[in-house]
Image (cartoon, helix red, strand yellow):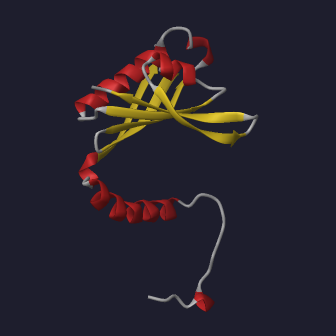
């Protein structure tokens, strides 16, 4: 089907949550048949730890899809970084992912962040994205959870 390009509009702007949802739906229409997965195979995951005053010590956000855990963010407040909370958050997420049927995990971390932390937990580098500001690189890592 040809599109009449005289009556279309291309726009650029800030992130559009409605557009994101539509793009996600469109990609699901391609991804599910290609991977043999369904919407039921997708899930969101978060882990957090708070102190007695309910102030956030740290947290982790991730997704699960078709047996894969994808770690999006892990952060621990500065004064608590030597107390093992990063490891506890990561291990809790991996355990929940296993409970959900995941047998592998992936994460990326800028070179100025925590690639060594993930490597100490069994993640292996699979590639890098160059050109991160500050002459950094984005280190992509993978781990079998089984």
In the image, 80 versus 103, the foreground residue is: 103
Instruction: Say left or right for 124 vs 92.
Output: right
x, y percent for residue 57: 51, 19
Instruction: Say left or right for 68 vs 134.
Output: left
Inspect this view and state whether residue 55 appears.
no
Q: Which quadrant would the N terminus be assigned to in this image?
A: bottom left
In the image, residue 77 sits, relative to residue 62, either above or below, namely above
x, y percent for residue 60: 46, 29
Q: Which quadrant would the C terminus be assigned to in this image?
A: top left
Residue under the point 66% across and 64% down: 13
Count numbered badges in the picture.
Answer: 0
Residue under the point 48% across and 11% down: 84
In the image, 126 versus 110, the foreground residue is: 126
x, y percent for residue 10: 63, 76
In the image, residue 144 sits, relative to residue 84, either above or below, namely below
x, y percent for residue 16: 56, 61
The quadrant in which residue 129 appears is: top right
Residue under the point 31% across and 26% down: 145
In the image, residue 136 sits, relative to residue 20, either above or below, namely above
Instruction: Say left or right for 30 vs 113.
Output: left
């Amino acid at each position: 089907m040809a599109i009449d390009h005289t009556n279309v509009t291309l726009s650029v702007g800030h992130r559009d949550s409605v557009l994101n949802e539509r793009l996600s739906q469109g990609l699901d229409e391609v991804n599910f048949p290609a991977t043999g997965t369904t919407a039921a195979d997708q899930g969101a995951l978060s882990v957090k730890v708070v102190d007695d005053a309910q102030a956030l010590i740290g947290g982790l956000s991730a997704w699960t899809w078709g047996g894969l855990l994808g770690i999006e963010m892990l952060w621990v407040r500065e004064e608590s970084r030597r107390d093992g909370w990063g490891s506890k958050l990561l291990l809790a997420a991996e355990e929940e992912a296993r409970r959900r049927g995941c047998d592998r995990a992936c994460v990326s971390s800028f070179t100025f962040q925590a690639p060594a932390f993930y490597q100490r937990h069994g993640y292996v580098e699979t590639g890098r994205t160059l050109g991160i500001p500050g002459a950094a690189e984005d280190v992509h890592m993978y781990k079998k959870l089984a």
